[in-house]
Amino acid sequence: MRRHFVEDTEGANRQPSHTDRPFMTRDALFEPFEIIDGDRGKGLVLLADHAGRALPDEYGSLGLPPHEFERHIAYDIGAEAVTRALARLLDAPAVMARFSRLLIDPNRGEDDPTLIRQLYDGTVIAANYPMSEEERQRRLDRYYRPYHDALGSMVASVAATSGAAPFLFSVHSFTPAMQGRTRPWHVGLLWDRDDRAVAPLLDMLRADPALVVGDNEPYDGALRGDTMFRHAISNGYAHVLIEIRQDLIATPEGAAGWAERLAPMVAAVNALPQIHEIRQYGSRTGPV
């Protein structure tokens, strides 16, 4: 069973590319998140913090031209398509943010200085500067917190339905190059101290000699206050954040291929008994 807050006008099985949708979605009533339902008894929660690039009407385009919303600064290219396909293949629930990270970044702590960016990879976001405290709180209340409330409710529901600690699998994507540096990885796994899901997934991914697999690349997974810290680390739940290179999943075929590659791996990790135990590993960022 699937429940969508946003109508899927492109077909339940079609994975759209990042170029075949308008760069922003205009809704009379803006929903900051979307839920895809699945079998909550499996103990698995899929999520995508940067799936969407929509903006509420009142923000226009944040003072940016349309082409900026085709870039990684607005959203994680391909992450939505991979998440939808994984939800279908695994019959697992998923929670995805619909708003652009340029409005407010759901994968940052509320006190993180990059929560609302004014400059991102060479682009000045005019509507984000200056940023009053009133406007900052408004974005937190209307977009950021509802997304995290929805994710927290899903995690709690999966825990209650399965009768065990849930496994959180977060889907992101990264650019092939950043600040003039080429990134050699095809995929990377980000984590802090809990390696229960990471270790077996690294082994499975590295079994393919054609893949260059990063361990805490292209970023470090220890980020205080981010989504994994808030919903997994603090609760002692097994988790992993996967980063897939964007050029590999920018097309429907690429996204579908990676979902088909990952689905049996995620299912195998989810079947491990230790994955569904509450264990406190702490964080490299400090006390939890």
Image: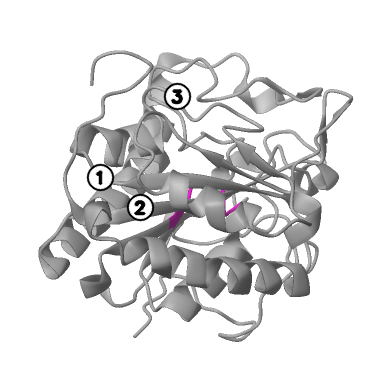
Residue at position x 30%, y 46% in the image: 238
Q: Which residue is mark 3?
A: 223
Residue at position x 43%, y 76% in the image: 90
Q: Are marks 1 and 2 in contact (CB under 8 Å)?
A: yes
Of labels 1 and 3, the one closer to you: 1
Q: Identify the mark nearer the N-term, 1 or 2.
A: 2
Q: Residues within 10 Å of mark 3 (few under 14, many from 20)?
A: some
Residue at position x 38%, y 24% in the image: 110
For the N terminus, the quadrant is bottom left
Residue at position x 66%, y 32% in the image: 218
Residue 26 lies in quadrant: bottom right
Q: Identify the mark nearer the N-term, 3 or 2.
A: 2
Identified by mark 1, the residue type is Tyr
Q: Do we see residue 35 in this rendering?
A: no
Q: Report the front residue among 187 and 209.
A: 209
State left or right for residue 158 relative to residue 48: left
